[in-house]
Image (tube, helix red, strand yellow):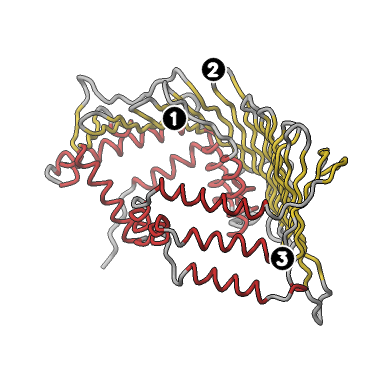
Amino acid sequence: MKKSILSMVMALVMAFSCIGLAAAEEGTISFDAKISADIPALMVQSGEATAELPEDAQQALNAVNAILNTVTLKGVFEKDAGEVALYAGDDLMLSIGAKKTEEGATIASTLLGNQVLFLSNEMVQQMQQQIQQQAATSATASAGSLNELQNIDKEQLGKDVAEIAEKLSKAFSEKVGEPENGEFTVDGMTFTVKTPVNITYAEASELILNSAKELLGKDSMKAVLKAFSQKGDPIEEIDKAIEKIKNQPAEEQPELSAAIYSNDKDDNYVVIEMTKKTAATETEEAKEEKVYFAEGLADGTVKILLTADAEKEDIEFAFNAAEGNTSLLGKIADTKGMNMDIDLNADQAGNLVMNLAIKDKDVNVKASAKVEAAEGDRKNFTVDVFANDSEKALLTITGSAGKSEDKPVSVFEGENITVLPLEKLASGEDATVTGQLSLTATANLLKSVTVLAKNLPEDAAAWLNAQVKQLMVPKKPAVQ
């Protein structure tokens, strides 16, 4: 059950991460997002409910479903102010906004009516310090890491990395063999020259490990090592790994082949193949595990391929980019029956289509995301989530984002606006003001519920009003 929910969330997050709607640095940007969901079916698919529910439970799910399908989330962001608001149909339910000023920050909300909360710069700093202290308490190592990272000599570290990278490149170039002319077709691309790289797995591993050891021994790496310090000496661990490779019999080492393909267009394509043979056991036959990696440029296309046929999982990964168009194909399958497929295509106009599928013995979830360029530097997006090969989406999110002429509905200042310093409210200096503010927020929250109910179907509105009345009825004291 939890696995199913996590897979749905993962699919949704990956779908949204592909939308990639960047905010403009200047001017106003806005977004709107609307969720349509089949809550009863979603609950059944996630294992949180059965197909047949008691009448009251079914009524509650239907009402929640209606509420979700009625509400729209909107946001407007300017240089020094931002706001998020909920709408029921075309009617504003509630909003909360914040505006930065020289003295601090002002928070306005429909819940507060004509009152706004003011946070001084000092209080903002105090809140930031509290957050940092809490983070330090819960993750002392992480906080220490950040402090150590500030001590890194980035300029010297860059020089050290470049120096060692040059040495490593020179060492590999010494392994380059004689070029072979001809016609070579590799991964659908044609080249005229093949240059082998004559290096074994042990030689390549030792070169890379010794380069890493040399880099870790540099003074510029001390702060990095301290920031990410773990038990044990990393240089000592590298020495152990090098010694293990040296002592490994040649017949047990993976076979490594590498070549560089090129042509008269200055295209270069590097291909590395590695094959490892596993020994036979009483229950399993001898197998070959293969890894194929290729990367380079040909005919104006950047291509990266990775396939791995390993003991526990198979991986296929292909990336192509040319003339502003990008495509990505990926597949992961393990021996436990888990499969994940991703197919993404994007163009230079900002259009994007992504499909993701996650499937194993307990889970079968698919998600799709689409982004389309719209008028006025805006983009429209749609995200759908499906389960168990259903044709109907269990969850759909639609909306748009980009540059906008919209303005926040929040009112931060004016003749009728009362400013309440948050410091005084937090200290409890004026209990009367605090109590009145609480009553105002409660009253305005009820108004928001009324706005929502007005836009709901009759059955859902009746259920919502009944829930509110139940909450408003004072609880009877327990009989002693």
State the CA–CA distance, disc 1 to disc 3: 45 Å
Q: Which residue has dot 1 on it? A: 75
Q: Is residue 369 above or below residue 41?
A: above
Q: Which residue has dot 2 on it? A: 376
State if disc 2 and disc 1 touch (CB < 8 Å).
no
Q: Amino acid at mark 2?
A: Gly
| Image point (37%, 60%), residue name | 139
**13 or 23, which is in the foreground?**
23
**232 or 449, which is in the foreground?**
232
Q: Nearer the viewer, mark 1 or mark 2?
A: 2
| Image point (71%, 55%), residue name | 175
| Image point (37%, 47%), residue name | 471
Q: Amino acid at mark 1?
A: Gly
Tag 2, which secondary structure?
Answer: loop
Q: Position of residue 319 (x, y in %)?
A: 70, 42
Q: Is residue 191 above or below residue 378?
A: below
**Residue at the left extreme, as displayed:** 429
Q: Which residue has dot 3 on it? A: 312
Q: Position of residue 144 (x, y in %)?
A: 34, 58
**Residue at the bottom extreme, as displayed:** 282
- Neighbor class of circle 1 (other Cα within 10 Å; few <14, some 14-19, many 20+) is many
Left or right: 244 as drawn, with respect to 432:
right
Left or right: 138 as drawn, with respect to 241:
left
